[in-house]
Image (cartoon, grey):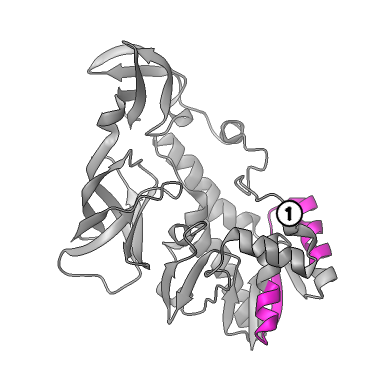
């Protein structure tokens, strides 16, 4: 059996290749090039050492069309976008499947920590679950996927890599956005567009100071300093009047979340369903909730409040370990 593996040479993709080979799979690597010469050379060298055929595909245009433009526009709307959630269905897995079709491979694979079985998506190991990032994949894409790292923790994968003598066994995880390798997203935005100007901070309806531009803030972020000896936090970003509303910690918690453009990974329910929800990849709380489908949107009523659901982030629904789908949080 042939599988096309998204291959960067990092510990996750390298161990994925070894696990697949141990299962008798013929592995073909694919590196998606975004003009990072050092990263491309590292992937080519790693593939050569491991004896994996590696194709390099230039994805700069696809990233621009489907991810970078969206990322820019979302910040100008006062949202907090997650580029990986947009990239996975429109760029990463589409490119993998296109190459798989080209060489007659039935499946594609990556080093994501999640699990796919019979076309359904499940959580990966609790320590490093990445199912949240895959919530916008299409059901036809899931049918072509095999993710070998789902049952393992990152610590176990690094131990495997060390046992196998893989050079990247202790290479630090890449935390930056791939198209902003220096992590300076403000500088990146400024080279693409005119940025929002400073405006007012609002607390209880009164102006209490000036912000530096709505693109610099996200809901839930703490504003430096104290107000009446209390910490205050960003609770709402209003691009229409260029204002940012502040609140106390206890006022950040919400029991109702709305999400638009919802991508169902199950047959769309016609009636309310019970589920659990996650509103940020970095937040592991998944309170039980009732989900009310409303056209291509959903209204999510949580049994326990979630902290600071931010417009532009995704609300991802689960039934136990299974991912039901995800949509973009928006402000009422």
In the image, residue 251 above or below residue 316: above
Residue 139 visible to the viewer: yes
Q: Position of residue 174 (x, y in %)?
A: 65, 49
In the image, residue 213 above or below residue 290: above
| Left or right of residue 35: residue 94 | left
Picture residue at 34% right of the left edge, 56% below the top: 327
**Badge 1: residue crowd in 10 Å (few <14, some 14–19, many ≥20):** few
| Left or right of residue 318: residue 154 | right
Q: Position of residue 226 (x, y in %)?
A: 38, 14
Picture residue at 45% right of the left edge, 41% below the top: 73
Residue 7 visible to the viewer: no
Looking at the rendered image, the quarter that the C terminus falls into is top left
Residue under label 1: 170
Secondary structure at badge 1 equals helix
Image label count: 1
Looking at the rendered image, the quarter that the N terminus falls into is bottom right
Viewer-proximal residue among 239 and 231: 231
| Left or right of residue 174: residue 272 | left
Picture residue at 58% right of the left edge, 76% below the top: 108
Q: Position of residue 310 (x, y in %)?
A: 36, 40
Q: Quadrant of residue 17?
A: bottom right
Give the residues drawn in magenta, as a range: 17-46
């Amino acid at each position: 059996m042939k599988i096309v593996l998204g291959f960067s040479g990092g510990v996750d993709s390298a161990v994925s290749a070894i696990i697949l080979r141990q299962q008798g799979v013929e592995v073909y690597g694919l590196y998606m090039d975004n003009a990072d010469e050092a990263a491309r050379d590292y992937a080519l060298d790693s593939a050569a050492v491991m004896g994996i055929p590696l194709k390099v595909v230039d994805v700069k245009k696809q990233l621009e069309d489907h991810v970078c433009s969206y990322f820019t526009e979302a910040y100008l709307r006062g949202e907090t976008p997650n580029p990986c959630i947009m990239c996975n269905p429109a760029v990463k897995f589409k490119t993998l499947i296109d190459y798989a079709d080209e060489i007659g491979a039935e499946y594609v694979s990556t080093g994501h920590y999640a699990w796919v079985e019979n076309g359904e998506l499940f959580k990966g190991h609790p320590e490093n679950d990445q199912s949240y990032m895959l919530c916008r994949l299409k059901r036809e894409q899931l049918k072509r996927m095999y993710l070998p790292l789902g049952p393992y923790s990152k610590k176990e994968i690094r131990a495997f890599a060390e046992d196998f003598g893989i050079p990247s066994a202790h290479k630090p995880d890449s935390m930056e956005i791939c198209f902003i390798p220096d992590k300076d997203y403000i500088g990146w935005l400024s080279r693409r567009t005119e940025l929002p100007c400073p405006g007012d901070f609002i607390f209880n309806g009164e102006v209490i100071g000036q912000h530096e531009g709505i693109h610099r803030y996200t809901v839930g972020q703490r504003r430096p300093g104290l107000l009446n000896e209390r910490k205050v936090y960003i609770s709402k970003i209003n691009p229409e009047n260029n204002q940012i509303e502040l609140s106390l910690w206890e006022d950040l918690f919400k029991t109702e979340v709305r999400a638009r453009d919802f991508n169902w990974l199950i047959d769309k329910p016609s009636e309310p369903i019970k589920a659990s929800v996650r509103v940020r990849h970095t937040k592991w709380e998944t309170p039980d909730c009732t989900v009310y489908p409303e056209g291509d949107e959903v209204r999510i009523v949580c049994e326990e409040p979630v902290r600071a659901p931010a417009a532009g982030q995704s609300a991802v629904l689960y039934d136990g370990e299974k991912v039901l789908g995800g949509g973009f949080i928006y402000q009422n």
